[in-house]
Image (spheres, helix red, strand yellow):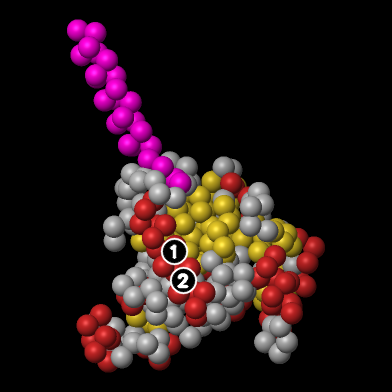
Amino acid sequence: MKRILFVLSISIFAAVLVSCGSNKKGGHAAAPERQLTVVADGVQTLALDSLKLTWIKDNAGAHVMPLSLFAAVDSVMADTLGVKEGAPATISVFYMETEGAGILFDAGMGDADSGLLKGLAALQLSPEDIKCIVLTHFHGDHIGGLVKDGKAVFPNAALWAPRVEYDAWMAMEGSNAQVVQTMDIYKDSLHLFNIGDALPGGIRAIPAYGHTPGHTLYQKGNVLIIADLMHGAAIQMKYPDICASYDMDPVKAAQVRKEILQYVKENNLIMAGMHLPEPAVTMPGE
C-alpha cells in the first residue's frame, strides 16, 4: 500500500511540473489555451493567468505587405506561398495588464483613421488614463501615435525606450526629425533603459537588433511581443532568412529572426507582433 501511495505521489508531482512548464530557453512549457475574446471591431483580448493582453488594430481596413518589399521572393515562391497579392499583415498595438500595471506597447501610426484611440476607448480607457508606454523601436508606424499637433497624445504616460535605439537615432542626420520631436515632447517623462534593467510590470527586454539598431522585444510569462521581427509572416515563418526592405541591417535581422523563432518554438510562446495578420497573435504550434 505504501509503495502504491509513493508511486501515486510521484506521478502527481510530475504532472504538476508538466502543467507549470518552463519559461527558460531549452524548456518545454505547456502550450497555453487560446482565450481570445472580441471586445470590438479590431480589438481582441487574450486572458492568461498572469496577464491580460489586448490587440488593437491601428490600420483602417485590410493591410497587405507588397511583394516589392521582399526582393528574395520570386514569382514561383510567391505562388507556392499564396502571396502573389502580397503578405497579409496589420499595423498593431498591444495593451498589457499585469502586476497592477497597464502597459501600452508602441503607439501606431497616428493617422486620422488610426484605430488606437478607438481601441483604447473600447477598453474604457482615455489617453489620459495611459500611464506607461514601452517602445520597441522608433519607426514612424510605432511612434506616430504619440504626438498630435505638436503635443503629447498621452500626457500622463511615462515613456520607456531602449537606450541603444535612442542613441542610434539621435546620431542620425536627415531622417530623424520625427524621432527628435517626439523624444523632446516626452523628455520630462522619458526613461531610457539598458537590457537587464527592471521594467514596468516585470516585463523582460530581449535585444533583437537588426531591423533597427535597438529593436527590442518584450516577454512576460508565455507572451512575447515580437515587434517587427516579421513583416510578412506568410513568407518569413517558412523562410526566416528573407528580409523586408525595412530591415536596416538585413544580416543581423535574419539571424535574430531565426534565433527568436527557435526560442519561441522551444518554449511554446505566444507571439504578439505589430505586423502579424489579424488578430496579430500567434499561438504555439500555429
Q: Which residues are magenta?
A: 1-24
Q: Measured along the vertical axis of the image, is residue 104 above or below residue 277? A: above
Quadrant hosting residue 1: top left
Kindly report the secondary structure that dominates the magenta region of the rendered protein.
helix
Quadrant (top left, top right, bottom left, bottom right) of the C terminus? bottom left
Q: Measured along the vertical axis of the image, is residue 53 above or below residue 140? A: above
* Furthest residue in direction top, as rendered: 1
Instruction: Tell me: 251 left or right of 167.
Output: left
Residue at image mark 1: 259
Task: Tell me the SS state at disc 1.
Answer: helix
Who is closer to the viewer here, 197 or 94? 197
The answer to whether the residue labelled 2 contacts the one labelled 1, judged by CB atoms less than 8 Å apart, is yes
Structural crowding at the residue carrying mark 1, measured as other residues with C-alpha within 10 Å and reported as few (<14), some (14–19) or many (≥20): few
Amino acid type, label 2? Gln
Residue at image mark 2: 255
Residue shown at the point (48%, 64%) measured from the top left: 226
Q: Is residue 9 magenta?
A: yes
Who is closer to the viewer here, 217 or 114? 217
